[in-house]
Amino acid sequence: MVFTQRMVTVIPSHTAPHFRMWTRHSTLQEGEPVNLPLQPNPDFTMRACKRAPTVRVDQRSDGFFGVGVLTDVTNAF
């Protein structure tokens, strides 16, 4: 699934020491968003890029979900 900025917001963590970022996903239930914690890998934090307003969510074969923040790396190349 791919979510655009209309359905998801990526925000930095202000109080949770174990996660650097969170995604806040809108749902069909007004006032009941789903918040997913993100721990960026070293490649994400070191990459010279601009974060795109898009998030990709995939269900892995083990049943867990993976969340990817898409980035624009045009200037890096």
Image: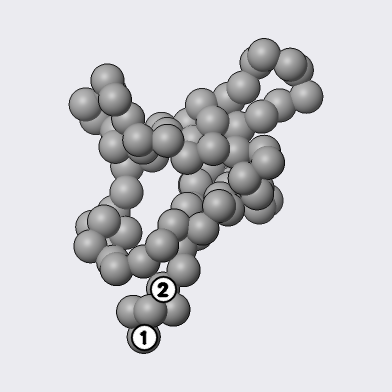
In which quarter of the view is residue 63 placed? top right
Query: Alpha-carbon neighbours of circle 1 within 10 Å: few (<14), some, or many (≥20)?
Result: few
Closer to the camera in the image, 63 or 50: 50
Residue type of the residue flagged with mark 1:
Phe
- Residue 73 is marked as 2
- Kindly indicate whether the residue at mark 2 contacts the one at mark 1 (C-beta within 8 angstroms): yes
| Residue 62 x, y percent position in the rendering | 51, 45
Compared across the picture, whether 38 is left or right of 4 comes to left
User: Element under label 2?
Assistant: loop
Compared across the picture, whether 60 is left or right of 38 comes to right
User: Element under label 1?
Assistant: loop
Residue found 47% across the figure and 40% down from its top: 10
Name the image quarter holding the C terminus: bottom left
Q: Is residue 62 visible?
A: no
Residue type of the residue flagged with mark 2:
Val
Residue found 58% across the figure and 53% down from its top: 54
In which quarter of the view is residue 24 placed? top right
Residue found 49% across the figure and 36% down from its top: 23
Residue found 46% across the figure and 63% down from its top: 71
C-alpha gap between disc 1 and disc 2: 7 Å
| Residue 18 x, y percent position in the rendering | 24, 30
Q: Is residue 53 visible?
A: yes
- Residue 43 is marked as none
Furthest-top residue in this view: 31
| Residue 2 x, y percent position in the rendering | 66, 52
| Residue assigned mark 1 | 77
